[in-house]
């Protein structure tokens, strides 16, 4: 008796669904992106993150760059709290930020609105405004030091043209800090203008056309349409400028005034530099740097909090 055998017909291979194909493509794209950014990220971690963490860890050590580091616990932090020079440097740093950030943001916004206009020759005008970006802080500091010279400097010569006698800008305790702040504002404006220009060009022209039909004037459009639409850009600019004025004040003060006269331009960053490389106190310098980092974090957090509160109330 023959036994019937059942032959199985091979099933065709199941084709991947559209969702599976999309998921596989996204996985390949993610791996490709990771391969491209991995070298930069590895370099950033090795040469920025690791040295920064190692530097901050020196807060709990005493080290003069020659002998072996010695554990001192919270000694450097206690010394920082009791050091009057730290609080004087903090006051100078706050003055740099207060005197510089608000004018930079407002001037950058106004100039951004001006260079966003459609007119003949606007390209050449933009290049002229962006020219300070080419100069480094060192070159700009040397240039402005010559301009601030009390005898042959350009600033005092211009003041003499209108019958005014200019002060000794960099050797006067009342004028040294405003003079340096003005120079940092000049350096910061091009980037601020670029950021505002990018934000302004994202506002649709239809919005202005509708407001014009409703009879809104230019000032009303500027206040009710332009300014609210660039609020995210303003937050970004404000945070960047807070960090910039804290860091740039170090370079400019070091080159132009060495923290003088009488410590009137010595910021926290510059005081940390002197502690590290003049006094050989790397641990104490790291404690000052940690204090400055916490200060920047608190200011940036406060700016973001205030911005969120304002955004909710105006929404």
Image (cartoon, rainbow, N blue to C red):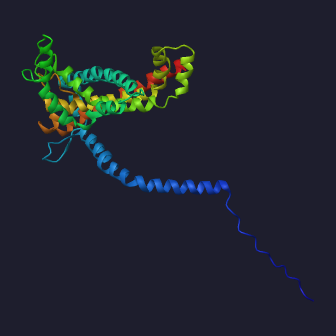
On-image quarter of the C terminus: top right
What percent of the width, then of the height, locates residue 8?
Answer: 80, 76
The structure residue drawn at horizontal position 24% and vertical position 28%, both measured from the top left corner, is: 184
- Identify the image quadrant of residue 303: top left
- Please say if 48 is above or below 32: above
- Is residue 243 visible in this depiction of the protein? no
The structure residue drawn at horizontal position 49% and vertical position 14%, both measured from the top left corner, is: 217
What percent of the width, then of the height, locates residue 278?
Answer: 11, 36
Farthest bottom residue in view: 1
What percent of the width, then of the height, locates residue 276?
Answer: 16, 38
- Identify the image quadrant of residue 239: top left
- Identify the image quadrant of residue 82: top left
What percent of the width, then of the height, locates residue 35?
Answer: 43, 57
Q: Nearer the viewer, residue 245 or 118?
A: 118
Farthest top residue in view: 163
On-image quarter of the N terminus: bottom right
The structure residue drawn at horizontal position 32% and vertical position 24%, both measured from the top left corner, is: 104
């Amino acid at each position: 008796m023959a036994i019937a055998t059942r032959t199985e017909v091979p099933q065709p291979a199941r084709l991947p669904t559209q969702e599976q194909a999309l998921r596989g493509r996204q996985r390949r794209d993610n791996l490709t992106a990771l391969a491209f950014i991995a070298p930069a990220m590895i370099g950033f971690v090795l040469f920025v993150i690791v040295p920064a963490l190692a530097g901050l860890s020196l807060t709990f050590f005493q080290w003069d760059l020659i002998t072996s580091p010695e554990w001192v616990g919270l000694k450097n932090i206690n010394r920082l709290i009791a050091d009057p020079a730290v609080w004087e440097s903090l006051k100078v740093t706050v003055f740099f930020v207060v005197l510089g950030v608000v004018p930079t943001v407002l001037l950058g916004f106004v100039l951004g609105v001006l260079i966003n206009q459609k007119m003949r020759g606007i390209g050449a005008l933009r290049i002229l405004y962006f020219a300070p970006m080419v100069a480094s802080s060192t070159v700009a500091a040397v240039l402005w030091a010559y301009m601030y010279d009390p005898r042959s400097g350009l600033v005092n010569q211009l003041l003499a043209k209108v019958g005014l006698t200019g002060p000794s800008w960099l050797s006067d305790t009342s004028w040294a800090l405003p003079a340096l702040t003005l120079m940092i504002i000049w350096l910061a404006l091009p980037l601020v203008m670029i950021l505002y220009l990018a934000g302004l060009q994202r506002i649709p022209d239809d919005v202005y056309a509708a407001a014009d039909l409703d009879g809104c004037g230019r000032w009303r459009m500027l206040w009710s349409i332009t300014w609210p639409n660039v609020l995210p850009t303003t937050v970004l600019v404000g945070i960047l400028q807070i960090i910039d004025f804290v860091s740039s004040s170090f370079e400019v003060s070091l080159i132009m005034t060495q923290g003088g006269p009488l410590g009137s331009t010595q910021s926290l960053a510059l005081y940390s530099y002197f502690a590290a490389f003049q006094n050989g106190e790397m641990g104490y310098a790291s404690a000052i740097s940690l204090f400055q980092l916490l200060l920047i974090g608190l200011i940036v957090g406060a700016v973001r909090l205030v911005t969120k509160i304002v955004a909710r109330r105006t929404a």
